[in-house]
Amino acid sequence: MTVKRFRFLLILAVMVIVATQQAAWAAGEGHESPSLFEGDLGNVIVTLITFLVVLFALGKFAWRPILGALKSREEFIEKSLREAREDRKAAEVRLKEYTEKLEAARKEATAIVDEGRRDAEVLKRKIEEDARAEAQAVLERAKREITTSKDTALKELYDLSAHLATDVASRILRKELSPDDHRQLISESIEQIGKIERN
Amino acid sequence: MNTAMLAAGNPMNHVYQWVYQRTDIGVDLGVFAPEGKVTVFSNHIAMQIIAALLVILVIPRVARTRQTGDAVADLTPRGLGNFFESICAYFRDTLARPVLGEYTDRYIPYIWTAFFYVLFINLLGLLPIEPLLRVPTNMAFPDAHHGIGGTPTGNIWVTATLACCTLFMIVFNGLRINGIEFIKHFFQGPIFIAPLIAFLEVIGLVAKTFALAVRLFANMVAGHVLLAVLASFAGMAFAGLGTAGGVAVSAIVVLVSTAFNFLEIFVAFLQAFIFAFLTTIFIGQAVVIHHHDDHGHHEEHDEHMEHNRGTVPSQ
């Protein structure tokens, strides 16, 4: 509201000033108009002086900082672009390097795994073979022991049988037998037992 | 009110130089000092001084670089500083560098100054301050018939002086940079027509300067006369068609004048730009001499071109 009123008052004031000046001017009408090319050496000198003053003042206080800013910005942009390009190049080289390294590492890892697998396979086979051999050995030993035990048992059985047979025979006959008879009886008994065993 | 005032007088009053004070220098220099007197103060001189002060006060203020401590922020202008700097950068990088090559930074302050000085004068001339300053002007100079105001670039003496500054820049720097080559450059072709060519070249140089002066002068005068004539229609309508007709015509006149004022703002920029741009080209032609093949300087030519190209950063 106040701003609007202020503006209105300002416009009114300007109108009043212009109107009064218009009136003041009207009294002075009737003078001769100058030419379109009005001017002389004075204008030349004034133009030269103002232009040169502006040239030197701006040269010192405006153009130097502006030119400096433009130049430093130019250099900054150029430097940034160059650095960016170099960084990019370096990054590409590094990327290539790392890709290669990664590839090598992957190959190496694959090789290691393969080797491990191969080793494991070999080991597995060896363990299996060992186990099998050991089992075989145990079996063999058991068989051997069984055979030995059987032989021992058989021998014992022969001895016992011979003794028993002798005992039984002597008991049955209750007579003196000549040693030849004994021997004959024994070998017959053995033969018979051998038959039984064979059967 | 303004319209009635303009209607009362000659529309051309708006663009004339109104001399407030002359001084006697004792020698009659013809057109330069009629009857031995020269102008000391006039509406145009006042406006020139105001424009000069404004330029000196405004541009250095906005040209200060920011001091934020951040390297990137210091290089990025903001606000009004950005407005001025972008104009400066455009002149330097886009217009001047292809023409001036390695000499760009040496002459760019002159080009910038020419642009902003002319621009400020052109824009100040668009301000309708003359009716407001009549009484103060009359108080200072009782003989004054016109208040301070107007466009100094609508004064041929002012534009001619500025154009002569450019001519001086052309000749002085052509000689300073290229020495005798600059003179030789005028004498082209076979020996018997070389003096004639040189004569034509000199005339061309004068014509360039003259065209520079007249172009700016004529454009500024034309725009202001157009506005004044438009305004005078309102006064004529009041006188011939009565109040109703006067108001109707005035309404149209105000609308059209507003549109033309926008055009004049554009013209103010355009003419300042053209003045500065042509100055750039003329200085470039004098300073960076391209040898022609018929001179027999093939190698030198190539070297010269390479040299120039080398200074332009690839973009």
Image: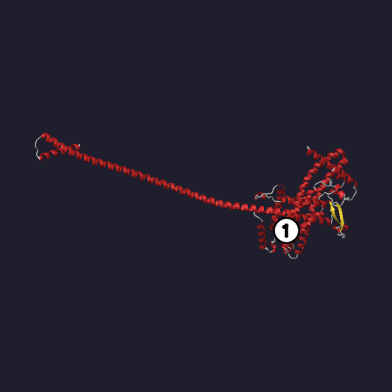
Q: Is residue B150 left or right of residue B94?
A: right
Residue A100: image location, x then y, percent: 50, 50
- Find numbered disc 1 in the image and state the secondary structure of the residue it sits on: helix
**Dot 1 crowding, Cα within 10 Å, few <14, some 14–19, many 20+:** some
Image quadrant holding the N terminus of chain B, namely top right
The residue most toward the top is A172
The residue most toward the bottom is B191
Q: Is residue B200 above or below residue B265?
A: below
From the viewer's side, name the closer residue of B228 and B56: B56
Examine the rendering and report whether any part of residue B255 can be seen.
yes
Examine the rendering and report whether any part of residue B315 can be seen.
no
Residue A161: image location, x then y, percent: 17, 37
Residue B58: image location, x then y, percent: 75, 50
Residue occupying image coordinates x 84% and y 42%: A15
Tally of marks: 1
From the viewer's side, name the closer residue of B280 and A14: A14
From the viewer's side, name the closer residue of A79 and B159: A79
Q: Is residue A100 left or right of residue B312?
A: left
Residue occupying image coordinates x 35% and y 43%: A128
Q: Is residue B301 left or right of residue A5?
A: left
Residue B126: image location, x then y, percent: 80, 47
* Residue type of the residue flagged with mark 1: Gln
Which chain hosts label 1?
Answer: B
- Coloring scheme of the render? secondary structure
Residue receiving disc 1 = B285
Residue occupying image coordinates x 59% and y 52%: A85
